Image (tube, grey):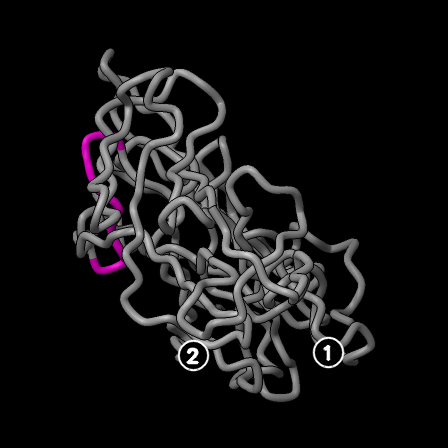
């Protein structure tokens, strides 16, 4: 149980991190002001968005990683090496997950039977947080879908600021199911990089960089239920190496890893034609979008 104190703690938010709920209490709890006593518990972003069936949680390099939590006292200071215990919340429902109670290393044995899958990280009987776990299938292959193109033609007047210029650059991630057919993998990371002209770090001051659906510089996406991950291009005509050319190209590479190794099909090389306004009535690929306006 929580110790009593004259200080009253209200539930609050620390950045984008999740805060704890006290066991058996409401949203507010009376807590101790002792700096060694936890007042909140957070679950920072985990090493990877999902765990493959038959495997443990791994980071992007394929190294096994336990779940992470952070405890803070009433002053917001981190409490080092607290005795956290981990448990599978839905253990009475199924035996889909195994978790090491001390380290927090999670292994997925099979697909859970319900829609909610959680690990509880608990400090004694006082405070805990529930960490959602997404379970998916381990991918074996990745491929490009569709033929991305630039929306419009040069010149770029800059009227739309950092809005994207391209249709989606789409990659599908799949695995082989028990019937030997390809099936889609959800909740898996795909990393994109502009390699021609070289901007592998996705610097948004460069001529070409990748953006997400909100026009923010981004080169990583997580697959949807249909197995696809997407990014778009932003091209600055004034800086583009061959801005006056009738037809040029941008090349993007996409990679998908499982257990530290690239899956079959990678790296995926996506070539996007870039056309000048004068080339709008030329042969494909530029003529395919002849009704487009100049890039804004």
Relative to residue 144, is residue 72 depicted above or below? below
Q: Main secondary structure of the magenta part?
A: loop
Mark number displayed over residue 79? none
* 72 or 56: nearer the viewer: 72
Residue 125 is inside the magenta segment: no
- Badge 2: residue crowd in 10 Å (few <14, some 14–19, many ≥20): some
User: In the shown orientation, is residue 119 left or right of residue 164?
Assistant: left
Residue, far top = 179
User: In the shown orientation, is residue 56 left or right of residue 193?
Assistant: left
Whole-percent x, y for residue 133 in the image:
40, 38
Whole-percent x, y for residue 102 in the image:
21, 48
The residues colored magenta run 53-61
Mark number displayed over residue 155? 1
Closer to us: mark 1 or mark 2?
A: 2
* 241 or 279: nearer the viewer: 241
Whole-percent x, y for residue 245 in the image:
58, 79
Q: Which residue is mark 2?
A: 199
* 257 or 60: nearer the viewer: 60
- The residue drawn where x is 22% and y is 60% is 61
- Badge 1: residue crowd in 10 Å (few <14, some 14–19, many ≥20): some
User: In the shown orientation, is residue 164 left or right of residue 52?
Assistant: right
- The residue drawn where x is 22% and y is 26% is 109
Residue 156 is drawn in which quadrant? Answer: bottom right
Whole-percent x, y for residue 5 in the image:
59, 63
Q: Earlier in the sequence, mark 1 or mark 2?
A: 1
User: What whole-number distance in Å separates the C-alpha atoms at marks 1 and 2?
Assistant: 21 Å
């Amino acid at each position: 149980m929580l110790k009593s104190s004259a200080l009253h703690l209200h539930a609050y938010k620390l950045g984008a991190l999740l805060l704890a709920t006290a066991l058996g209490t409401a949203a507010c709890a009376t807590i101790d002001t002792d700096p060694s006593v936890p007042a909140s518990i957070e679950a920072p972003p985990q090493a990877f968005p999902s765990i493959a069936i038959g495997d443990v949680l791994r980071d992007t390099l394929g190294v096994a990683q336990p779940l992470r939590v952070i405890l803070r006292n009433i002053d917001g200071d981190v409490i080092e090496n607290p005795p956290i215990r981990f448990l599978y919340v839905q253990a009475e429902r199924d035996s889909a997950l195994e978790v090491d109670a001390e380290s927090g290393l999670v292994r997925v044995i099979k697909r859970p039977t319900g829609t909610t899958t959680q690990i509880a990280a608990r400090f004694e009987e006082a405070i805990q947080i529930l960490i959602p776990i997404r379970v998916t299938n381990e991918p074996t292959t990745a491929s490009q879908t569709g033929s991305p193109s630039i929306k419009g033609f040069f010149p770029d007047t800059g009227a739309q600021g950092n809005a994207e210029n391209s249709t989606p650059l789409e990659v599908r991630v799949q695995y082989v199911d028990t019937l030997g057919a390809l099936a889609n993998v959800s909740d898996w990371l795909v990393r994109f990089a502009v390699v021609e002209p070289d901007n592998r770090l996705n610097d948004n001051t460069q001529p070409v960089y990748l953006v997400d659906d909100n026009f923010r510089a981004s080169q990583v996406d997580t697959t949807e239920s249909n197995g696809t991950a997407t990014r778009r291009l932003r091209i600055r005509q004034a800086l583009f190496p061959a801005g006056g050319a009738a037809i040029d190209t941008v090349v993007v590479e996409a990679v998908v890893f499982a257990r530290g190794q690239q899956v079959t099909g990678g790296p995926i090389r996506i070539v996007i034609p870039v056309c000048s306004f004068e080339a709008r009535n030329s042969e494909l690929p530029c003529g395919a979008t002849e009704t487009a306006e100049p890039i804004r």
